[in-house]
């Protein structure tokens, strides 16, 4: 397939079909960045990965890591952590704190987070709309781990997680998977493969298979 250049989109434009890009991952670039754009992008398998020089770069990664809430893997050691109630797991009580904690984690070659202030502003607006959610691990009054993402339809789109104490993010993730299953969420989009997510039961699919699966859940 001929290499396609990423589309430059405005806030009123539609995102292109990522299936037309083959294995190419960068789908679009925009100067605008709004909650509405995010809500339109994710059901197409597209997400904003980072901001550079005032532009937002939108990706559909290949391959894609996914998980079904019912298939989350709980190791023997994690079963003990959960049984002992090492952490108190809560939802949506500290969304901004979770996002900012995730933004403090060095990532990538330059050890910089993609979670800029514009990302925080947009996702806080989505949280206020009831679209963006957090799961948190607490020890007393201290937030020690958590994750955040978006719930759209039958899919939870995971964004990032952090841990300030061993097993904190795993505990929050496992308990949140159980809650998502009860809510009727069928799929968790983990976006990018990682050893951490693989240890929790993540599986990898080619982009085209992921897009077909995602379309069936709209």
Image (tube, helix red, strand yellow):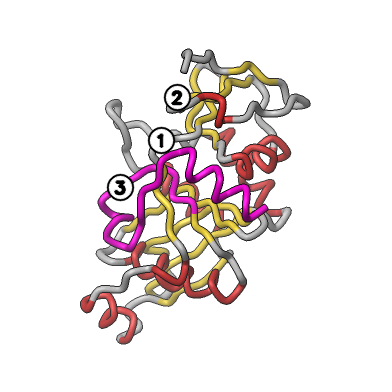
Alpha carbon distance from label 3 to label 2: 20 Å
Name the residue that disc number 1 marks.
62
Q: Quadrant of residue 37?
A: top right
Please tell me whether residue 215 is drawn above or below residue 70 in the rendered image: above
Specify whether residue 209 is painted magenta. yes
The range drawn in magenta is: 189-218
- Disc 3 crowd, CA 10 A, few/some/many (<14, 14-19, 20+): few
Tell me the residue at 52%/24% (across/down).
21
Q: Would residue 3 be visible to someone looking at this image?
A: yes
Residue 101 in view (yes/no): no
Instruction: Of the two numbered discs 3 and 1 on the same chain, state the one appearing first in sequence.
Output: 1
What x and y, as percent, mark residue 179?
53, 74
Q: Which residue is mark 2?
A: 24
Residue 6 against residue 90 in the figure, above or below: above
Numbered mark located on residue 194 in the image: 3
- Measuring from the top left, give residue 201's x and y in whole percent: 33, 62
Which residue lies most toward the front here? 1
Label 3, label 1: how far apart the Cα atoms are: 13 Å
């Amino acid at each position: 397939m001929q290499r396609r250049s990423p589309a430059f989109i405005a806030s009123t434009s539609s995102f292109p079909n990522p299936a037309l890009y083959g294995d190419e991952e960068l789908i679009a670039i925009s100067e605008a960045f709004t909650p509405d754009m995010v809500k339109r992008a994710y059901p197409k398998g597209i997400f904003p990965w980072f901001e550079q020089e005032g532009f937002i770069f939108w990706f559909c990664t290949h391959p894609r890591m996914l998980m079904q809430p019912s298939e989350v893997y709980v190791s023997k050691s994690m079963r003990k952590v959960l049984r002992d109630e090492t952490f108190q797991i809560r939802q949506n009580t500290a969304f901004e704190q979770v996002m900012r904690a995730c933004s403090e984690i060095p990532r990538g070659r330059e050890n910089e987070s993609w979670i800029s202030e514009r990302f925080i502003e947009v996702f806080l607006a989505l949280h206020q709309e009831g679209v963006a959610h957090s799961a948190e691990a607490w020890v007393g009054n201290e937030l020690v781990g958590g994750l955040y993402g978006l719930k759209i339809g039958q899919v939870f789109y995971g964004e990032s997680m952090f841990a300030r104490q061993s097993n904190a993010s795993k505990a929050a993730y496992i308990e949140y998977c159980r809650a998502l299953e009860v809510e009727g969420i069928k799929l968790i989009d983990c976006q990018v493969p990682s050893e951490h997510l693989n240890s929790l039961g993540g599986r990898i699919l080619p982009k085209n298979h992921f897009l077909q699966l995602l379309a069936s859940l709209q």
